[in-house]
Amino acid sequence: MSEPDDPAGTPAESNVGAAATPDLDDPQFYLNRELSHLAFQKRVLHEALDDRTPLLERVRFLGIFTRNLDEFFMKRVGGLKQQIDAGVTDPTVDGRTPREQWAEILETAAPMFDRQTECYREVVRPALAEAGIEIVDYDDLSPAEHDRMRAYFEESVLPTLTPLAFDPAHPFPFISNLSLSLGAYVRHEGDAAEEDPIFTRIKVPQNRPRLVPVEEGSRYVLLEALIEAHLDLLMPNVEVLDTALFRITRNAEVRHDQEVAEDLIEAIEEVIEQRRFATAVRLEISADAPEAMVDLLQTQLDLDPAEVFYRKGPLDYRDFATLTALERPDLKRRAWSPLSHPRFSEGSTADATMHGADLFDEIARDDVLLHHPYHSFDGTVQRFLDAAANDPDVLAIKAAIYRTASDSQVIQRLIDAADNGKQVAVMVELKARFDEQNNLQWVRKLEENGIHVAYGTVGLKTHTKTALVVREEDDGVTLYSHVATGNYHSETAKGYVDLGLLTADRDIGQDLTTVFNFFTGPSLDEAFRKLLVAPVTMRQRFTELIRREARYARAGRPARIVAKMNALEDPGIVKALYRASMAGVDVDLLVRDICRLRPGIEGVSDTVTVRSVVGRFLEHSRIYYFENGAGPDDPADADAGGNPQYFVGSADWMTRNLDYRVEAIAPVTDPDLREQLRFVLEVMLHDNRTGWEMDVDGEYEQRTPGDDPVWSTQEILMDATRVAHQRDDDRGIDTDHPASPGDLLVTGDEGVDDGD
């Protein structure tokens, strides 16, 4: 396995240039991973700022931004603090030390939080009020409303509160991660003015509605404001001198190295417990908080002044998403419900769905490409597993679970399969961050039902999303495989864009058999027929494919790479793409968030574009296209070149995916399915509504339609899915030279026959 390049140097400058023979180890050619991710979060926040976004969707994106930044500080900032404390000074590929990265992150994040607050206070909240949805200050309530709120507080909120004082008789209270707290300085009645006030912490309960209705469905007051207004009931016989809201974020990067698989469950339980008490990495506090309270919290939580963020509005916007449940279609995007896959519908009636042997016959006839959330998870993946669990001819089922729903029907079908006498083996990744507890519960339930469970691999995280069904048929045993980009999670499948390949290809089935044997056996085979498998073959194969395009370009043949992924972080892959561009390869990258590569460097990346799509669904699928020496319609044999190659699967171009995770990428060879993937890529490359384009400095500009038709990727794909679900014609398209989005919707077997 080849190692990624690890150049060092000084931080990149904005005026990037290139010598005649550029040194690709120079840090100036690489963007910083953490700052690139924050650039993505700016694009997420823009959805709340964009007045073209429906109002309640803007509210939802305020909450998404909060949740994303919470996770970023827990994982990435927490990890950097650990490196700083450990004395690590080695620079990353872009030339920054951990301390330099930490400082730049805090400096970059502060104005982003200010912008979120400004968006809420100056734009979203007034717009909600104009639409008849008011979030009011407590002091603005009428006397009658005050009375109702006081009664509600006494009856429903007061019994849940526990004031925790910090004084000589009480230690500083434990403050849980991401909990919203009200801090108060109080003095007992009769105490002298010169006596020090007592700090008291009140946790805002998470099991009470954060937006308390004053009038049903129209006016709300925030729970923390309600608590602050009634401290006299919570703490009688004291004088409240000052108050402030605050919220802390703790490090989630707690680790426990284990060499013995039998101890893995105990180790994961220890990680979960340690995370509760991990060091703080951020303090958010009311902008008007008393200086003494800020100093106290900084001291007790061991925080640097740079880690304190003063907020003028709410500290946590996650709960505001409850407003999206209001029956206000005028303030939302048009509704979308995932549709059944045309290949899994019998006849012309969409509700007539196939099960059992018919479903396996359909997969055996031709490969099937699933596209969520355009296609229903329940009607595709879940139905595949239902059929496997109940079909008497199925001998065995194997599945790799990274994340799944808390009420997972996927797990239940695996249990049903075992009850029906199938051999069932499940790989459950216990190290899936923030899902450890959920996965531990599923491990115990599976084992209680007699199912063999593998927990993970020492030194590797299992990230592949695959399932294998072994079925006895008239001509022998057939292997049915599912290779996907997304988790076996019915809820995230409604909001994450993911792909899945269902195939009866014997080679892919044999490769998956090898992968599953690794989960329970001693080693991972390094020979695979078709799958690209990390950490053994994937890096080498992707590098070879990139270099092959460069050879074709130098020979004057057509050469193009289109790659869609969540993140492009690996320095070795970036360097290979630079060299491909220098050879003349057209490189179109669709990268959702982190991207180390700088496009548009003269003499280095002139032929590279980097685009990002941010829409109502989270773009999570990975598609890799290599032109292979000819245009996309050249029918030449793949072995001789001239046959474009497509791949889908679980891995991004990140070092962790290529070297430290078990991943699987599958080739897509069926011509119809390849056309579907080409359709998706071309739509995204044309997007002028939700698409963004990166410049050489790593800054993004949102693409706009101007006088051209509006191209919005996810809207077009929803329309295309509806059309594919309903039509009977076989009209073709030209995705290379489309005149308008409508041209991409009029498609038959050569286009989006399966709803993509």
Image (spheres, grey):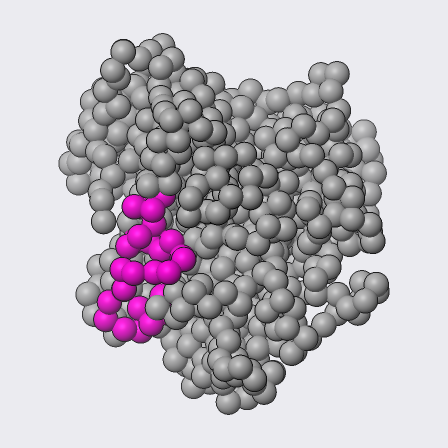
Residue 699 to residue 7: above or below = above
**Residue at image point 34% right, 60% down:** 528
Where does residue 498 sit, x and y in percent of width and height? 56, 51
Q: Nearer the viewer, residue 313 or 143?
A: 313
Residue 14 to residue 472: above or below = above
Q: In the image, 533: left or right of 63?
A: left
Figure quadrant of residue 228: top right
Q: What stretch is highlighted in magenta?
A: 515-542
Question: Is residue 531 magenta-colored?
Answer: yes
Where does residue 470 sit, x and y in percent of width and height? 49, 77
Where does residue 663 sit, x and y in percent of width and height? 38, 55
Asked if residue 172 shows in the view, the reply is no
**Residue at image point 59% right, 39% down:** 633
**Residue at image point 75% right, 28% down:** 740
Residue 470 to residue 340: above or below = below
Asked if residue 733 shows in the view, the reply is yes
Q: Which of 323 and 83 is in front in this view?
A: 83
Where does residue 477 sit, x and y in percent of width and height? 49, 80
Question: Is residue 665 magenta-colored?
Answer: no
Q: In the image, 108: left or right of 460?
A: right
Q: Nearer the viewer, residue 477 or 379?
A: 477
